[in-house]
Amino acid sequence: MLQIENKLGKTLDAEKLKKVYQKILKKFVIDPAFAECGLHIVKKKEMKEFNQKFRKINKPTDVLSFPIDEPLRKIRNPKSEIRKQKNETVSKFEIRNSSLEIILGDIFICTEMMRPETSLEKTFIHGLLHLLGLNHQEQKKYGYF
């Protein structure tokens, strides 16, 4: 489940964000019904405080991700190795689907700091991929960043 907190008061398309969330999780073989994530749209001042506190950088940024569970990419789906042997295309980050709840973590986005050409959805995907364990290099490699 994706829970959205919007501190800006501006309208945003929550349904579109939820669809993006579900689509990305399904690519990682995660049932969205069993995965929890918080999305917080915050003001520049609050983002600067988070960035200072957690990264020791005294300026705001566009997105910060705070994972709760161990990075999910460490959990491999045994079937993915079998598929690789059969030369089928499988994401290296495919993980085991589980009926246990996965608490991904929280994503904080400051829309004031986003580049004009970047959408809220794209920034959200970037933060979500960090929660799923992909760094910037891996996101570039798979065409997300």
Image: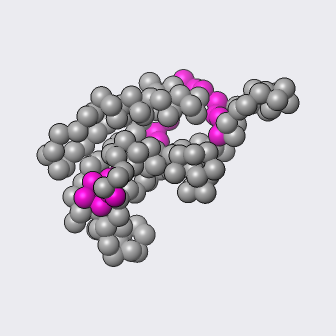
* Residue visible at 21% across and 58% down in the picture: 43
What kind of colouring is applied to the model shown? one colour
Question: Does residue 119 show up?
Answer: yes
Residue 53 coordinates in the image, percent (x, y): 36, 70
In screen coordinates, is 117 left or right of 82? left
Q: Which residue is at the front of the view, 73 or 8?
A: 8
Horizontal arrangement in the rendering, residue 77 relative to residue 12 (left or right): right
For residue 110, what is the image quadrant?
bottom left
* Foreground of the two, 91 or 117: 117
The range drawn in magenta is 93-115
Give the quarter of the image for residue 112: bottom left
Q: Residue at 71% across / 32% down in the picture?
A: 90
Is 11 rendered above or below residue 64? Answer: above
On screen, residue 76 versus residue 112, left or right, reads right
Query: Does 137 lie within the magenta span?
Result: no
Q: What percent of the width, then of the height, locates residue 102?
A: 50, 35
Q: Position of residue 60 (x, y in %)?
A: 31, 67
Q: Which residue is drawn at 19% across and 49% down?
A: 7
